[in-house]
Image (cartoon, rainbow, N blue to C red):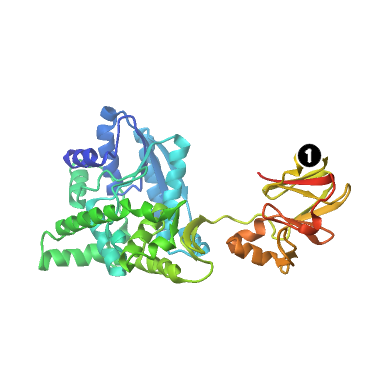
Amino acid sequence: MNLRNFEDLNKRKKLIEVGDKIVIAMSGGPDSIYLYELLKYVKEKMDLTLYFAHINHSLRGEDSDDDEKFVIDLGQREKIETFTRKVEIKKYAKDNKLSEEEAGREIRYGFFKEIKERVGATKVALAHNEDDVVETFLFRLIRGTSLKGLEGIPVKREYIIRPIMSYRKEQILDYLDDENIQYRTDKTNFQSIYTRNKIRLDLIPSIEREYNVNFKEKIINLISDIGEFNGIINSNVQKYLINDTLSIKELKKETNFIQRAIISEYLQKYDISVSRNKILEVQKLIDSTGSKEIQGNSKYIIKKVYDSISIVEVKSKNILEDDQVSLKIPGSVIWRNYQITAEIVQNENLKIESKEVFYCSLSKMDNLVIRSRNNGDKLYPVGMKGSKKVKELFIDLKIPKEDRSNYPIITHDSDIVWVGGIRKDRRFMSTDSKSIKLKIEKL
């Protein structure tokens, strides 16, 4: 086996180190088989531990099942611990409003990460080759993308590595055929019914034949230049970040082109697929008013709140918006992720209050209700004249709309005593040495 390409790439990118435990994304196709052969070749020298992880996408019926069986049998013969999972890509895509391509990518990477953590691996190796890089570049160029998208497939990103990216498909097939090494063939790869297949089977051969026989090499060089430029942009991203959120104030200082480049880098941090349309959609948030959000992928949403843009993980809601608990004084209850305590005190440290403590004029055995906010809620804030709607209070404090129902509203006989941790109602302020101490703690 020709190891020079791998050794040169590994020297530059430090993909594999001595003692690595590597999960191989094993489809059973020629690329993943070649990847395994390469790693097996250096396994003893570099003291590697290898695993197989295979996803059955259920897209090709019996052929998909046969691929899975092939990988399982290979793992048994080679004494490689093998993990497989069968999924319904079409259903997942529909349920999460994704394309099949995006759905497949999310499921694969999620599965690989799961196996990595389960076995304590250090790397996940994917079998992209140099032809894949060129095809991806042209595919994204045709569909429309950003400069980040045109950078193509990264050789290394966190724990994901692609050790055979400097090998051509022709080299891979020649080696496997010469060594009589078996692999699975996906027949759909030879059908010109998908854009990517048309690029591989029709467009690239036509350009090489009619215009430039070294076309792939020229594209690889261009991708390298784009990568260097994006590296410069990436090194400056921190300038626009405040607590890992994009500062709209800083973005507005830049040209539209630089804004898009920064947005692209920011999305990549969360593994959100970058397309020109997605970047333009996020860019529109910069000049929008109020709070807005757009879908990033099935795991994240992109939120614009006041003067920042952030990426937030989507969490399923297990709590009813109208849930409430009762608290009889003295006592303590838990509401969502808060603990609210009421106790009877007298002359306690001259009643030094804080955001978490409220000394109030309630009485023993009074019953409090802790709930989320309701439309029309109002209170009489300490230090202010008249009343104020809770909604206006949240707006003034720039609390995101979707977070407002998570703040505890502590009430007595339907009157608001305290918007927990934010504002106290002056009607319930204590004037006696003896009072009720309310305390709120976030769990």
Q: Does residue 286 appear to the left or right of 440 in the view shown?
A: left
Figure quadrant of residue 61? bottom left
Residue that numbered label 1 is attached to: 348
Question: Image point 45% across, 49% down: which residue?
Answer: 110
Q: Would residue 402 be visible to someone looking at this image?
A: yes
Figure quadrant of residue 443? top right
Q: Does residue 75 appear to the left or right of 410 in the view shown?
A: left
SS assignment at label 1: loop
Against 86, residue 137 (above or below) is: below
Q: Does residue 289 appear to the left or right of 202 in the view shown?
A: right
Instruction: Depth check: give the residue in front, 349 or 148.
Output: 349
Q: Does residue 166 appear to the left or right of 319 in the view shown?
A: left
Q: In the image, residue 21 lies at what x, y percent?
A: 37, 34
Q: Would residue 191 be visible to someone looking at this image?
A: no
Instruction: Depth check: give the residue in front, 176 or 43.
Output: 43
Question: Image point 22% across, 38% down: which residue?
Answer: 11
Against 372, residue 432 (above or below) is: above
Instruction: Depth check: give the residue in front, 4 or 353.
Output: 353
Q: Number of callouts in the render?
A: 1
Question: Image point 22% across, 64% down: which residue?
Answer: 201
Figure quadrant of residue 405? bottom right
Q: Residues within 10 Å of mark 1 (few under 14, many from 20)?
A: few
Residue farthest right in this picture: 365
Against 439, residue 46 (above or below) is: above
Instruction: Depth check: give the residue in front, 5 or 264.
Output: 264
Q: In the image, residue 31 lies at what x, y percent?
A: 28, 48
Question: Image point 14% across, 61% down: which residue?
Answer: 215
Label 1 is placed on what type of residue?
Glu
